[in-house]
Amino acid sequence: MKLSFALFVLTTATPLLLADPVHSANKRQLKSSKSHSHKPQPRQLPEIGGLMAEVFNFWEVDNEGKRVETKPCTVQSCEWNPYYLTKRYDGAHPDYAGHPTDLDVRYAFYAGSPSLGQAFAGSPLHCNIDAGNDVQPPSCPKIETLVDNGIDGVGHIPPHIALAALTWAIEDGSYTVEEIFNYDFYGCRVVPDMLLKMIRHYYPRTDGEKVAYPPPFTPEGGDFQYEFPSGNGIDNQNPPYLPGPPHWCTQEYLDTGNWPDFCPYIFKGENAGKYRHPHIAYAALEVFLAAERYPNKCGETWLENNPDFLNQERVSTVLKFPAMENEDFDADTVENWLVQPLLPYAYMKPGPKAVGGDHFVNSVVLA
């Protein structure tokens, strides 16, 4: 949908339902607060990597990660890149080898920054509008709240937490697909209130404190197998992992203190190109469950449920990147995807613009 203007606010349009207390975030014994006409049964969901490949219909690549054949792209036939190296083209046409952004999949608790002319607009980093082009991430915090019902709502909840909670709730047999969808209001997406309810059962909040969400590659963080954090360095890609971003920067770039998200994902060794965004995994699971709930309304691929993504006139969600090395390589090539930010660092803040995505929890869209 093309928007003429979008303004983020830090209040929620609809009060979110709060979860019942639980004894431990590590216990997977969630009980629904609703009375069931039948007792939900535990079940095993598909492996998330295979599910992403089906829902996003990955194209074929050769041993170097290069696309074997470029096919016409329609809602029914479009393919996505399985050899994923950079978020630089996220939100752009699939042929550029990016993936949908958190905004595109309409992840409810992203708490992204508005595009009012500040640095890193559209990311979860909220920079001062007066900060210069050289502003560094520590000056641009994410929205982390002390309560769920304050002026900032629940704030930013990492999407791997939503993925873990939704997975556990369905596999434990604590919720059914009938309970977590409402097509009339949210179409083929999980109702945000229900998602928060699941999250707070597994990751409860103590009012007055921030919630300490564990990393995605830990068991308590969902044991997500497609993160590949860089804490051990490029020559040691095997678990146990040391904390670090999934972006593999040069030490020279890290020493500048600038945002590591501009660096490529794992690009060397047997795991090269295998990184996957947790919000893409969440979206894939959501599509799978929605198709089960509404087989005549919700499709089995993400594009079937989000055809406007291919509309050339839609509002862009592409993140502004700094100058990058090897700019002479075409944007649809592996050589372009794996480059590092150019040094000396050269970043220009984006100008104000309308914001893509459907921010139905932490924003209001003005026509």
Image (cartoon, rainbow, N blue to C red):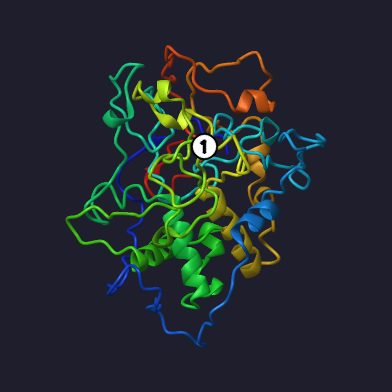
Pick the front one: 121 or 99:
99
Q: Which residue is at 74% across, 33% downward?
A: 66
Describe residue 309's horizontal placement relative to residue 110 as left or right. right
Comparing 131 with 34, the one in front is 131
SS for dot 1: loop
Examine the rendering and report whether any part of residue 182 can be seen.
yes
| Residue lying farthest to the front in this orientation | 235
Say which residue label 1 marks.
Answer: 235
Q: Mark 1: which amino acid?
A: Asp
Depicted 116 relative to depicted 309: above or below:
above
Residue at the left extreme of this rendering: 208
Image coordinates for residue 303, horizontal then vertical, percent: 67, 47
Q: Residue pushed farthest bottom? A: 38
Crowding at mark 1 (Cα within 10 Å: few <14, some 14-19, many 20+): few
Quarter assignment of residue 1: top right
**Residue drawn at (53%, 45%), measured in percent from left and top?**
277
